[in-house]
Amino acid sequence: MEPGSPCCDEICSCEMLTQATERWRLKVSANESLRSKAYDLPDALAVNEFCWENGWTDGLPILPPTEERVIACLEVAGLAPGTVIGVERVRQRPITAEKAAINAVLAGCLPAYMPVVVAALRAMCEEEFNLHATSASTGGPAPFIVVNGPIRTLIGMNATHNVLGNGSRANATIGRAIRLVLINVLGVIPGEVDRSTLGHPGKLTFCIAEDEEDSPWTPLARERGIAEGQSSITVMAAAAPRQVMNEWTHDPEEIAETFAAEMRHNMLTYSVWAGNYFLIIPKQLREILVAAGWQKRDIQEYIFSSARVLRGDWAKVGKANIVDRSGGPTQEFNALKEPGDLLVVAAGGPAGGFGAVIPPWLGSKGRAVTKAIDLPN
Amino acid sequence: MTIRVFDPTFDETMASAASPTRLTALAGCSVGLLDNGKLGARELLDYVEEVLRFEHGVVNVLRIKKPDASRPAPADVIAALSRCDGVISAVGD
């Protein structure tokens, strides 16, 4: 199945769900069952209202987390309910497989998506992701997830048209499941642990697949040490996408320069600190770069050289008051500590000279983390 | 006919860190004040310390500043604070 083609809903929701549920009915009766508090409600609409009243949603409707669906998610991920997926280090809160599965069902995930949700949560509990700070910060970032490998097509993820927008159940509900785990398990509720001044729309969901089939470039995960054929996720706490456009050149340096300019602008108007930046490069611009013989490494090296600002540049964006601090007007800042900090992703629809820069929350204080997705036999 | 659903929220019985017993009075206590390192934290905690000492009879106040507002407090800071009867973690944004 091509990325972006209709989701395999029938397979996932019928065969996989039924088989998983049947297997788990036996296991659960013999071993451990769900430990979470249960509620008996009249119907699905009542469940929806009940969840809203309890503050268990992101504001959108939810699906009822019934035993069958929760258990099917656990089965597909190959996890017992009490398995600890990860621990949020500051408040020392464990995220169990059971709670992750309940929230995945609430979010609308099919059981087949659960291994992706689990891998993302595992990655977010690594120290370099900085989960508590990135969840609580006034800066209001959102976990941005990029999926690589065969699972993208198996679960019908979108890597093409409208990739940063709506359209794919997998993209939408995997990202949403992460948000609901943050809300419900870690208490990342606006005005409570979540102190975001603005937040951004990616806080509802922010998950894409890389268009590996239609790109000659090395997929992101392979660049980050994941073996060919292994599915994986890369996740980073990220600011909102900044869209760029350049339809007036076939010069690869000029295209790269448009992205670099947007990064410089981000450094001046938002945060100057060096960290991981994502570049999302759709097909039209990608083909120009590919025709010129550019690999991802060429883009990384160009941007590493070009995405730099001087402290004095702040005077142009209303921040003259800090120009004379520290190293003074000639002090240089680089968007990247090294070329490999630029995470180039091939994704987006075929037409249009657009691209996007997705900046980090606060330089290298929240780093991108890549994890393999465990798929049990 | 009803539909049975499960609670998505954190279960305190799964907590790996136990919440300390809440203090019922502050007189004679030692209180740690953790400054998160942001601009307004010191001013806020100066006032909090004054209130604790003069209105609530707090005897010892331990003032510690996190080296980095955007990262968790390091182990030595947590260890020092853990010797206090109570701790206030201030966000001075």
Image (spheres, coloured by chain):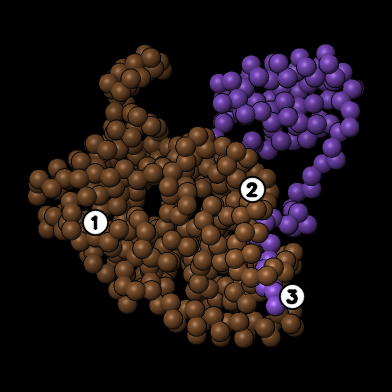
Above or below for A142 versus B27: below
Q: Which of A255 and A220 is in front in this view?
A: A255
The answer to which image quadrant residue A170 occupies is: bottom left
Q: Which residue is drawn at 50% across and 85% down?
A: A15
Above or below for A225 versus A12: above
Disc 1 residue type? Pro
Q: Is label 3 in a helix, a strand or a loop?
A: loop
List the residue tagged with mark 2.
A187
A331 displayed left or right of A113: left
- Disc 3 vs disc 2: which is toward the camera? 2
Q: Specify the colour of chain A.
A: brown
Chain under disc 2: A
Disc 2 residue type? Gly
Q: Residue A356 carries which label?
A: none
Q: Residue at x 56, y 84 (%)?
A: A18
Above or below for A133 versus A314: below
Disc 3 residue type? Glu
Q: Could you tell me residue A65's position as x and y percent?
A: 62, 68
Q: Specify the colour of chain B.
A: purple
Q: Residue A32 carries which label?
A: 3
Q: Is label 1 in a helix, a strand or a loop?
A: loop
Chain under disc 3: A
Q: Is label 2 in a helix, a strand or a loop?
A: loop
Chain under disc 1: A
Above or below for A151 versus A187: below
The answer to which image quadrant residue B65 occupies is: top right
- Observer able to see residue A56: no
Mark 3 and mark 1 in contact? Answer it, CB < 8 Å: no
Pointer 3 or 1: first along the chain:
3
Q: Residue A282 carries which label?
A: 1
Q: Which residue is drawn at 76% across and 31% down?
A: B87
Q: Residue at x 20, y 45 (%)?
A: A245
